[in-house]
Image (spheres, rainbow, N blue to C red):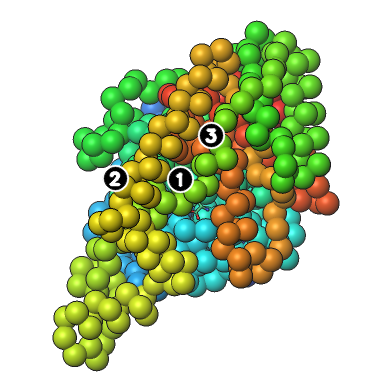
Amino acid sequence: LRVEDLVEESYKRIGEVDDKVGAFLALNEDKARAYAKELDGALGTKDSFGLLFGMPIGVKDNIVTKDLRTTCSSKILENFDPIYDATVVNKLRSAEAVTIGKLNMDEFAMGSSTENSGFKVTKNPWNLDHVPGGSSGGSAASVAAGEVPFSLGSDTGGSIRQPASFCGVVGLKPTYGRVSRYGLVAFASSLDQIGPITRNVEDNAYLLQAISGLDPMDSTSANVEVADYVSALKEDVKGLKIGVPKEYLGEGVDEEVRQSVLDALKVLEGLGATWEEVSLPHSKYALATYYLLSSSEASANLARFDGVRYGYRADNAENLIEMYKQTRSEGFGDEVKRRIMLGTFALSSGYYDAYYKKAQQVRTLIKKDFEDVFEKYDVIIGPTTPTPAFKIGEKTNDPLTMYANDILTIPVNLAGVPGISVPCGFSNGLPLGLQIIGKHFDERTIYRVANAFE
Ligand code: GLN
């Protein structure tokens, strides 16, 4: 088997199905083929190989790639070709993986369905009438559709785990600080993390291994030794203590989703783990806290898109201020504007204490809820989402029901802990996901538990 064949296989599959699925925004064909050839050529000449040698990978379009168009699915960046690679992209290169192309997403990662893309809607490969989830919808759909075996997504409030759940693949949000954010276009800097989306748990551990680590270019990346994730898969779950938050199986959660989690817990019990009901009492405030904080951070981060430095610039503006206004009015979509306005309001003087500061205080309480549970338990388990993938168009007119879909993933980002979604069943032909949440920097234990479902 040659790398060139693997890469060809990937482009062939994209040619066959991507018209329907709509996962990719840009392909990296010439460079991927040339690199594949280079890797094949090196085969006989060296005896150590990159961890992901020759593996085709797709990259979410908010991760910058040198000379390869990076749009964040926004009109405001429709002609933006970065001049450098994100740290994760450099790490993929060191691991000798082959970047196949860039993946569709909700504009600037704001959304839960990929319907907020400024360019196209990605479909769920299991049922094309349904959404793939979001915002990393292209990343999850491309893996589910067999176009690439690996992809990178980003998760600010659930954007890796929720689409992984909807598409029946494995998606991990690492501990905040585990993976460098250098070159990830910032949405909410205190919450954003890049993570791996794959077909199975083993691949996921390999991809996390390749992208993790301290980075001098990201001051929030952590100086914590990178564990051996792959070897965790050899360990069983005997003796592990699992906490199941009652808030995660209550009101609003579909009966079939609930049942699939209870079935998964039975499997773990059979393997020698034990579980008990626990409480994360402040979860009910997580949604409000998240939308205040993430929108506040977004309003500051997105100030840089002004028509001067990157991408789109409105023509015919009479002066500089008009140029800013027109560029941003024409370049940003509705959801992005909604968040910028919400964030600007929450940060404005006179409101700051009532909204932003209060939300920061509640965030601390949410973090403490997790710390309390983790004093006695090794992992926390619940569903990834309250329902399976919804229909395209079903929630587009009601931002609040769209936001509510992230109720079970958001607390994890606010606490900064890692979480994975692994497939755990089906409801009406659509996949369901089990969420396994771990202690800070304890992705190993998450993988041990996740591996029980392989
Ligand atoms: N759906 C959430 C939002 O719209 C989460 C997005 C994400 O994790 N990037 O903000």
Where residue 95 appears, x then y in whole percent? 39, 36
Inter-mark Cα distance, 1 to 3? 10 Å
Residue type at mark 3: give it.
His
Residue 300 visible? The answer is: no
Indicate the secondary structure of the residue bearing disc 1.
Answer: helix
Indicate the secondary structure of the residue bearing disc 2.
Answer: loop
Residue 113 visible? The answer is: yes
Whether 4 is drawn above or below 179: the answer is below
Q: Identify the image quadrant of the C terminus.
A: top right
Residue type at mark 1: give it.
Thr
Nearer the camera: disc 3 or disc 2? 3
Residue under label 2? 182
Which badge, 3 or 2, comes first in the chain's sequence? 2
Whether 88 is drawn above or below 185: the answer is above
Inter-mark Cα distance, 3 to 2? 32 Å
Q: Looking at the image, which residue sits at the far top?
A: 239
Residue at 56%, 37% in the rendered image: 283
Which badge, 1 or 2, comes first in the chain's sequence? 2
Where residue 72 appears, x then y in whole percent? 41, 62
The reply to whether callout 3 and callout 2 are in contact (CB within 8 Å) is no
Indicate the secondary structure of the residue bearing disc 3.
Answer: helix
Residue at 52%, 30% in the rendered image: 205
Residue under label 3? 282
The reply to whether callout 1 and callout 2 are in contact (CB within 8 Å) is no
Q: Is residue 91 left or right of residue 36?
A: left
Residue at 51%, 26% in the rendered image: 369
Q: Residues within 10 Å of mark 3 (few under 14, many from 20)?
A: some
Label placed on residue 289: 1
Nearer the camera: disc 1 or disc 2? 1
Q: Nearer the viewer, residue 55 or 181?
A: 181
Which badge, 1 or 3, comes first in the chain's sequence? 3
Q: Is mark 1 within 8 Å of ligand 1?
A: no
